[in-house]
Image (cartoon, grey):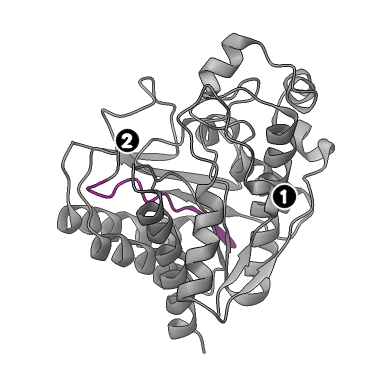
Amino acid sequence: MLHIVHHPDYVAPRPKRSSFVFDKYQLVMEAVQQHAPQHIAYQPEPMGRTWLEAVHDPAYVEEVLIAGLSPKQERRIGFPVSPAIAARVRYTSGGTWLAAKLALQHGYAANSAGGSHHAMADAGAGYCVFNDLAIAAHRLLAEKDVGRILIVDLDVHQGDGTASLLSGRDDVFTLSIHNEKNFPARKAQSNRDIGLEDGVGDEQYLAILDEVLGEILDSFRPDMLLYQAGVDPHIDDRLGRLALTDAGLEKRDRMVVSYARRRKIPVASALGGGYGTDHQAVALRHARSMIAMADETARTSG
């Protein structure tokens, strides 16, 4: 059973000055409905301002919420932040937190948006406004739902914002496996960074993940795994420079869940990146990713 968090406001009106495709999130849900008809959908509440400001600078939070960012700030994000988008990013942050709470009950749950891993304390970047992964991690720890969190970021781009916002904490471990020559040009320092050369395919990628993931799980011993499950390492992705196939992505996602569930660690995934001219193909990759992780959870339970 796929437990998935979604809100209609994840789909915001597409800004005129952006290449970002907001309707992807509706297409993802349509693909889930087609290929996983037995799923259960949940609607998140908007993340409270207190929790946003626990991770982001209060002045920046205020500018976002009143849709008052400067043109320079919006260029760094990649689109203008309208009132609709300001509301959306509160829901997506609430969605990743809710997925984590559901994962504590069911072993695995997914947010059908989120994974905004480039957002920094006082600025957005790379299509990311608020860093839902860092916000969710902080809240889960502050409310003592868990004591230690591993964030596994397998988006093709490094999770620089997540690494920066959670740097120095001994109760969070950040792992990023990404394309080294891709955005962002200036990388932050995760607890473990593995930068891959262009063109790395399934076999090499999975061997690297296999080598590092079990070791970190056993040495850090987290109570929860938050997974940035971007599908942009795919060979056909418009912004990716790696060469994973559909089968490779599925093996990647099953490996993450399998390694965690063997150790009784719940997994919550955020959607992450996926880009291309065929929007339905990208949405299907995301849907198949979540369906595979739910299936792996069922297979390894009991």
> SS class of the residue under badge 2?
loop
Query: Closer to us: mark 1 or mark 2?
Result: 2
Residue 154 in picture, x, y percent from top left = 38, 48
Q: Quick check: can you spot residue 93?
A: yes
Give the left or right position of residue 148, taking residue 192 as reference: right
Which stretch is magenta? 221-236
Reply above or below: 222 against 128: below
Is residue 104 rendered magenta in the image? no
In this rendering, position of residue 129 left or right of residue 278: right
Q: Main secondary structure of the magenta part?
A: loop
- At label 2, which amino acid type do we have? Leu
Residue 111 appears at what percent x and percent y? 59, 57
Q: Which residue is mark 2?
A: 239
Q: Residue at the location (22% across, 57% down)?
A: 245
Find numbered disc 1 in the image and state the secondary structure of the residue it sits on: helix
Indicate the position of residue 4 as horizontal and vertical percent values: 60, 66
N-terminal of the two: label 1 or label 2?
1
Q: Is residue 227 covered in magenta?
A: yes
Q: Which mark is residue 94?
A: 1
Q: From the viewer's perspective, is residue 37 above or below residue 61?
A: below
The outermost residue toward the bottom is 302
Residue at 29% x, 44% y is 237
Residue appearing at x 37%, y 51% in the figure: 231
Image quadrant occupied by the N terminus: bottom right
Is 93 on the left-hand or right-hand side of 158?
right
